[in-house]
Amino acid sequence: MVVESDAQLSENFYASTCPNVELIVRQAVTTKYQQTTITAPATLRMFFHDCFVGGCDASVLVTSDNGDAEKDAQDNISLAGDGFDTVNKAKLAVEAQCPGRVSCADIMALAAREVVVLAGGPGFKVELGRRDGLVSNASRVDRKLPGPELDVNGLVDLFASNGLTMTDTIALSGAHTIGFSHCDRFANRLYNFSAFMPVDPTLDPAYAQQLMQSCPRVGADPSVAVNLDLNTPNVFDNVYFQNLVARKGLFTSDQILFNDFRSQATVIRFANSAEQFNRAFTAAMRKLGRVGVKVGNQGEIRRLDLKMALNWGPVLMSVIFFIVLTPGVLFQVPGKTKVVEFGGFQTSGAAIVIHTLIFFACITVSLIALHIHIYAA
């Protein structure tokens, strides 16, 4: 069980060490959001996945050459690359002004808040002071994340194990007001619901037909994406709950929130009042951000993604390239210009010029390669 902890977290944690961190993150996230609105659901979902597996410690960001990091788990493979790119770019922007002071975990929490606001949702204060986790294993993900087939009991139990109430569960499910999913995540509701009823009877018939057109039983395109909110898919609002009342929830785990009498009243309340949903959502997000946090010596402040920090291959290759070329340049270039002394050897001035140009070219190529690697990781 991952318990909630707000030990040593503070809204003003970086007041003296990086006072502009929120502005830096906001600018980086806004730039990314302007490039693609997928930034919002991708970043928000990644934050949720990170917190539910070992706590909010940015362990989902870590890349492994062996393919056994948290992000490589089956339940995380579908995390959109735009979410990772958003946090990585925000981290790089923060590092440029406050090197080694702000954790990836805190940047991810801030980025999650920013995408909600950019999509039209409510703003809220983010508590800071998390450390980045030291462990990232795919094996830790198993049974830690809610699947699309869960019923209310399964949802409540899973969220309760992270210190969240039923109201928190329903409010956080409202994040499905933005984003999309693929056919294989809900096709069972259209074709294989039960031996007697192939179509889920709790699904609005017209909506079911619409989904069947996008996801036919045979020949469905696995790349086809279906919006979680069919009305306002790019706007963070309470229409998701109105869809549930109209029996137009995409996942079983969505629709069951209205169908089950224990959660139905809250769904109706949120459907009728965006203000009440926003209030519950922001409270739940603050609680989510406290789940299993690492503070002090429980974690670290990661300068970059672990793989980024260790991958100096491009630099090493450029050094080797430089060394290999050195003899040929110094001693095989025809000495038609004045012969000069260079490191105890006689060579031509032209050779020295060429040698110097190659040196700077190697350094430039290595830095470009490292820069590309950091942004692609």
Image (cartoon, grey):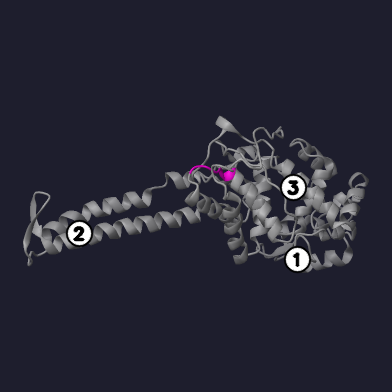
Residue numbers of the magenta segment:
100-105
- Near-viewer residue (278 or 3): 278
Q: Is residue 44 magenta?
A: no
Distance between the Cα atoms at labels 2 and 3?
A: 60 Å
Is residue 62 rendered to the left or right of residue 218?
left
Q: Looking at the rendered structure, which numbered label has been put on residue 355? A: 2
* Rendered image: mark on residue 147: 3
Mark 1 vs mark 2: which is more N-terminal?
1
- Residue 186 in sight here: no
Quadrant hosting residue 177: bottom right
Q: Residues within 10 Å of mark 1 (few under 14, many from 20)?
A: some
Q: Disc 1 to disc 2, how far (Cα)?
A: 63 Å
Residue linked to disc 1: 216
Tell me which amino acid carries mark 3.
Gly
Our reading of the magenta stretch's main secondary structure is loop
Evaluate whether residue 168 shows in this view: yes
Q: Is residue 37 above or below residue 196?
A: below
Indicate the quadrant containing the N terminus: top left, top right, bottom left or bottom right.
top right
The residue lying at 79 percent from left, 53 percent from top is 174
Earlier sequence position, callout 2 versus callout 3? 3
